[in-house]
Amino acid sequence: MSHKLYTIQEIQAIIHADGVINHPETSIRTLSIDSRKLTDMEHALFFALKGRRNSHDFITDIYESGIRSFVIYDKEFNVSAFPDANFLIVDDTLKALQLLAAYHRSLFTYPVIAITGSNGKTIVKEWLYQLLSPEFTVIRSPKSYNSQIGVPLSVWQMTDEHTLAIIETGISKAGEMEALEKIVKPTIGILTNIGEAHNEGFSSTEEKIEEKLKLFENCGLFIYSPFYLRGYTGTIPGRTQFTWCHHAKADLDVWGDEILENKYQFLRGEFKGGEVQCIIPFTDHASVENAICCWATMLAMDYNPEISDKRLEKLLPVRMRLEMKTGNNNCSVIDDSYSLDISSLTIALDFLRQQNQHVKRTLILSDIPESGVDPANLYEQVARLLENKDLDKLIGVGPMISSNSDLFKIESRFFDSTEDLLQHLNELPFFNETILLKGARAFGFEKISRALTQKVHETVLEINLNALENNLNFYKSLLNPGVKVMAMVKAFSYGSGSFEIANLLQFNKIDYLAVAFADEGVTLRKAGINLPIMVMNADELAFETIIQHKLEPEIYNFRVLENFIDILNQKNIEQYPVHIKIDTGMHRLGFMDNEVDALLDLIHNTDAIEVKSAFSHLVGSEDVSLDDFTDQQISSFATITDKIEKSLGYKFIRHIANTSGISRWKQAQFDMVRLGIGLYGIDNAYQERSPLESVAVLKTSVSQLKNLKAGESVGYNRKGVLSDDGTIATVKIGYADGYDRRLGNGVGQMSINGKIVPVIGNVCMDMCMLNVSGIDVKEGDEVIVFGKDIKIEKVAADIGTIAYELLTGISQRVKRVYFSE
Ligand SMILES: *Cc1c(COP(=O)(O)O)cnc(C)c1O
């Protein structure tokens, strides 16, 4: 698929920029906004967007990676430091990106479908892609790129080889849709539904509807359900409309629905005075609504009802997430085999590159099903993409990629089919590497995934890496400019994993990591983490290891300091970075106020160490009743560190705030903050309406169901007794997994198929039982222990503890699965 090449002067004119053009022959086809995800350097234009991070700070790095064209907003920026680069200077770089996308969109006359609504946008987009692909060469928004930035990047992918665009748009507050309309200029509009999402950004539902409808102002055809516009009195957009509804007058009136074989929904409706029907391979309410929306769209686009029915019956589930699991032979397997096109491949490769635990990176890639595109062109683009992504090995699966094998310059092997690869799997010694699986659905890559990964004890802790990233960004947004972030990854990152989390943090350019013990630091070093790492419990036994792996000890008393200086002297090491712990009230580790003079004497008398930072810890930053004490801690910390700084004559990093210290104590930020549990989505400062996203979901499954009579008992010591006839489910989690025994006998609850059910009887070592009387449940069903419907804070409170203890208590036999959406 060849993208139009723009000259840099053309772009300058389109976005009305001032320019410093040192490289006039540059042509552009790729837009970049993230310094960590660069590709196609020769033809890329980098937009320095205003945001949480000052993107101008990264221009040197980006320049070094080979990019020569930039759009910037800082008029003071020293462009003369880059004598062979192009700089386009504008007031607002986001507006410039949008202008450029709008221009690009205007070059094409084929239909553009725009989708918006509160829920279901991505599913409807993916399903329409499945349904319309036989006739059209479709370009669609990658993943859920639907924001003020995502939409222009989606539209930018249009080329003249496509024949249809499907663009998803999302807004979170009033005033945003107008900008998106100008970029997308849809010819066909779809409103999926109107629900509660993002209500806080609007003064009323009416305002929200009005804002969303702005997208469709210039549409030829607008497809919607009047049900979602109840109470809306404004004008309905679109030159023509197509409506759908349940049991009401509409162009498509769906009046019959019946479930077949427990897994299909049979829908009947009235269309143009006759009866139409279709079968959908889903039965849950949301999927059925989304499928009807697609059905309406096909009918509105004049598809024959029989063809619509045939295609709808074959709809495939949309899985947008990518999972990382532990593989055999110390490999990590990233499984992203649910859809395959260039943009999802790019996203997955960026994820692969972000994970550094193994030096070697392998991609297993199937043929890419892009209809209507010249294959040579397509695989040339793939080869180019792979060149910039630090890949070591490619394994191609399928006839198309195999016949283009000479395009790939890295170590590679090719197989005709998945079966062919599986037969030769033992000849491919996967060892100590990260393997990305990227296969089109028809290739059944789940078979490869199964062959490469360990058998799982079915209780898993799922870690949502996007949520973790969002939480990090949330806390960054609370910081004064220049304040650094140390992430606390002690205790296996609060139970969530070690290098997987540290890699993500390193990728996000965090400043520091902290662990509890030297061993934890060594594990991170071995996994390729090169950030500075502070070790909190550093003592004589660990000093050798600490020095060998360039870890930085916390110095909390004279014994530790003197011992460490001795070892450094023996090794003739000078200026070794250390972190001085001050005790301002925790009374755990650290120098007391009255010890500081002696401490300073010691430091003045040696060249062995350099004070990298001085810090203290708040005892109750989240607790309103302790605010006076916290205030005292902060001011005594300021006084003591002022004194140290004056005496030493050089600056060091000062830090005292933990998670709630960041959210509640602006004056406690000093030079750095130490973010712990907040990363994992938990902060006691936010009781309701937390801005954080939950990161960890603990899941298990039902092993057996039993019907029991009233009065019969369940489990050890007959502690659980049914008061009525009922059903119990035995699930695969017990106290050896970290499910606390105090949660037995009705104290704890879990969720099955959206229903909350109590634990009955005592919790056993590897199992426990739930009372599922009257609930629709089958053996093998998934059970949420905490995370989604059951908040971990509540589970903790039920047994008088805190989320920290539950998270870190989940045993290592519970497999961690990481995913990214
Ligand atoms: C664990 C820890 C933190 C992080 O605390 P959270 O409440 O999880 O943010 C910060 N500083 C020190 C010294 C710690 O031990």
Image (spheres, grey):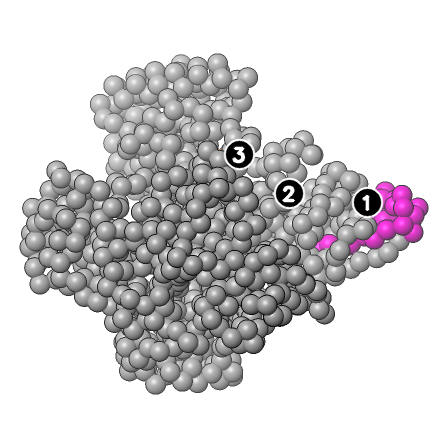
Q: CA distance from mark 2 to mark 3?
A: 15 Å
Task: Please report the residue visible at 38 percent of the width from the left and 60 percent of the height from the top.
Answer: 220
Q: From the top left corner, tell me how far across and down residue 786 is, in percent.
A: 63, 45
Q: Mark 2: which amino acid?
A: Ile
Q: Amino acid at mark 1?
A: Gly
Q: Which of disc 1 and disc 3 is earlier in sequence?
A: 3
Image quarter for residue 567? top left
Q: Measure the C-alpha gap from mark 3 to mark 1.
A: 34 Å
The three-letter amino acid code for the residue at tag 3 is Arg
Q: Is residue 726 above or below residue 551?
A: below
Disc 3 marks which residue?
Answer: 689
The residue to which callout 2 is attached is 790
Residue 761: which numbered mark, if any? 1
Q: Is residue 514 visible?
A: no
Give the x, y percent position of residue 517: 47, 41
On screen, 43 above or below 654?
Answer: below
**Of marks 2 and 3, which one's residue comes earlier in the chain?**
3
The stretch of residues the image draws in magenta is 709-732
The answer to whether residue 800 is seen in the rendering is yes
Question: How many numbered marks are there?
Answer: 3
Residue depicted at x 41% and y 43%: 211
> Quadrant of residue 207 in the image?
top left
Gap between marks 2 and 1 measured at Cα:
20 Å
